[in-house]
Amino acid sequence: TEKEVGALNILVNNASIFADLQPKPFLQIDNDEFDKVMTVNARGVHQACKAVVPAMLRAGGGKIVNIASGTFYYGPPGLSHYTASKGAVIALTRGYGRELGDKNIQVNAIAPGLTESESIQGHAGFDPARAPTVQSRSIKREMVPEDLLGSLMYLVTPDSDFVTGQTLNVDGGKVNL
């Protein structure tokens, strides 16, 4: 509770379903799987924001960072439900950023590329995607979770007080917008 831990002024929405997904054509994705991915990846962001924003308002402001995905920009085949869910995260980020900006709450997102984390190493699509992903990047190496830290730290500090509703691609230069 706020009384026990103090003011709540940072939320990082990092929960996601990805590692358990088996890439498949969208015609083979049943409604239950689609709904589960959307519920965790998109509705989870909405619910977490709804839960913490009242405390941030009481504290006089805060920072929300949603973890999206670079898949939104290039739409890999076989993961349309995941891609759609992360597109929803980007849309929620933009909308919440507009809605909460005048309340001193900045809402931004990070869209990482394929990241070599423990959870992803067992994913069926990881090994086949590894080499082509590295080759498609301007920075020719695998991405590790630590590559996100600088961007995350920027977005949760006063250095980003005039940035809201934005998505920062952290992918080694794969997506150049």
Image: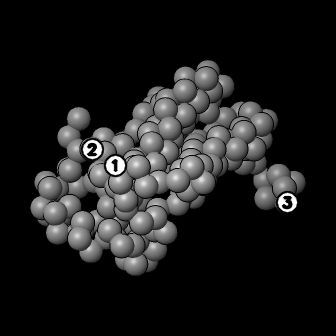
Q: Kindly tell me whether residue 4 is visible in this rendering.
A: yes
- Secondary structure at badge 2 equals helix
Q: Disc 3 residue type?
A: Glu
Return the mark for residue 71. 1
Given residues 78 and 140, the one toward you in this image is: 78
Q: Kindly tell me whether residue 86 is visible in this rendering.
A: no
Given residues 148 and 75, the one toward you in this image is: 75
User: Which of the 4 image quarters holds residue 103?
Assistant: top right
- Secondary structure at badge 3 equals helix
Q: Are marks 2 and 1 in contact (CB under 8 Å)?
A: yes
- Mark 3 = which residue? 4
- Mark 2 = which residue? 74
Q: Disc 1 residue type?
A: Thr
The residue sitting at 50% across, 38% down in the picture is 88
State the separation of the CA atoms marked 1 and 3.
Answer: 39 Å
Q: Disc 2 residue type?
A: Tyr
